[in-house]
Image: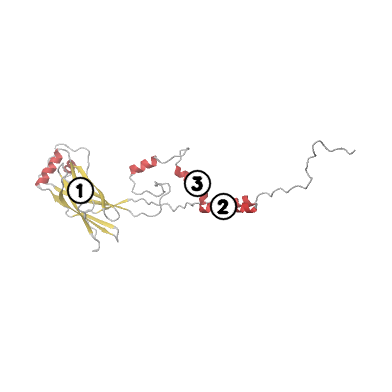
Amino acid sequence: MKMVRFFAAFAVVSLFMLCPINVYADEGECDASISDCSTGDKTTTGTSTEGVTTYPIQHSFSYDGQFVDRGKLLVQVMKKSKKISIKFSSKTYEFSSDEMKGMKKLVENNRLYRVRIPLKPDDPSSPWLVASIPACQMLENDFKESFRFHLDKSGTITSFELSSKTPSRECSQGLSFPKSVVLKSKAVASIPKEAHGAPKRGGLNDSKGAKVANMPPELQGVIEENKPKSKDGKEAEEEAENQSFVRKYWYLFLPMLLMSVFGGSPEPQAGAAGQGRSPPAGGQRKKK
C-alpha cells in the first residue's frame, strides 16, 4: 500500500514538473512607436561610408493618371547615430507653363493634386506610393506643402502623407490664380522607435500570446471588442492568469500534498478470533 502511495505522489510531482510555468518579465513597452525627426532646412551630416537613397518625385495634373517629374528626395540613414537625414534636392520647385495650366484646371474643377514616389527606387517595376491633396488647398496656402514620410528601421519609405499648413474641408471661392507658382516644401520623417523590455501584461496579444506591434488603433478596437468573454463578463485572458497561479506556485502546495498522502490514519487491525461475533441464529441449545 505504501508503494502505491509513493507512485501516486511521484506521478503528481511529475505532472507539476511537466506543466508549463508562466513567467512574466517586468512590464515594458514592446510596441513600435513613432518618433519624429524634422529636418527643415538643416541636414544631418553622416559618415562617408553611409549611403544616400534617392527617390524620384512625380506629380500629376491630368485625370488619366499621367505623372511627370518634379524633383528628387534624398534619404540618408546614419546607423551609428541612429538618425535620418531627409531633404529635397531643391528647396523650391517652379511650375512650367503647362504645369500652371494643369494646376489651374484642377483648382477650377475642385480636383486633387497628386504626388507619388516609388516604393523601391532601384527597381524599374516597383509599385508607387501616392498621396493627394485638394488643389484649392495648395492655392489657399500659397503652394506651401508639408510631407510626412514613414520609414521602417532600415530607412526605407513605407508610406507618406501630403498636407497643407491650414487644411480645410471646403475651399474658398473667388481665389485668384497667381502668374507664377513656386512650391515650397517641408519634409518630416517618422521612424520606428527601438523596442525595449518585455510586453505589457494584459495588452493586445495574438493567438499565441505574442504582442502585436504596429496595430492600427481602429483594428485594435475591433479585436478588443471581439475578445472571448466568460459567463461572469470577465475576459478569458484573466481566467487564464488565474489558472496559471497553481502552476507558478506548485512548490508551495507540494509539502501539504505529500503530508496528506503519507500522513493518513493507519488501517484498522483485525480483531481477535471469535470476538465480536454475533450469536448464531436461534440462540444456544440448552444442555440436556
User: Alpha-carbon neighbours of circle 1 within 10 Å: few (<14), some, or many (≥20)?
Assistant: many
Picture coordinates of residue 120, whole percent (x, y):
23, 53
Picture coordinates of residue 247, whole percent (x, y):
51, 50
**Which comes before the other along the chain, label 3 or label 1?**
1
Q: Mark 3 and 1 residues: CB-CB less than 8 Å, in contact?
A: no
Picture coordinates of residue 274, whole percent (x, y):
79, 45
Q: Which residue is identified by label 2?
A: 11
Q: Residue at x 34, y 44 (%)?
A: 217
Quarter of image, res 102: top left
**Which comes before the other along the chain, label 2 or label 3?**
2
Image quarter hosting the C terminus: top right
Q: Amino acid at mark 1?
A: Arg
Q: Residue at x 47, y 45 (%)?
A: 240
- Could you give the CA–CA distance between mark 3 and mark 1, rounded to whole angstroms? 53 Å
Q: Which residue is identified by label 3?
A: 243
User: Alpha-carbon neighbours of circle 2 within 10 Å: few (<14), some, or many (≥20)?
Assistant: few
Q: Secondary structure at mark 3?
A: helix
Q: Secondary structure at mark 1?
A: strand
Q: Nearer the viewer, residue 175 or 238?
A: 238
Which of labels 2 and 1 is toward the front?
A: 2
- Could you give the CA–CA distance between mark 2 and mark 3, rounded to whole angstroms? 20 Å
Q: Which residue is identified by label 1?
A: 116
Q: Amino acid at mark 3?
A: Gln
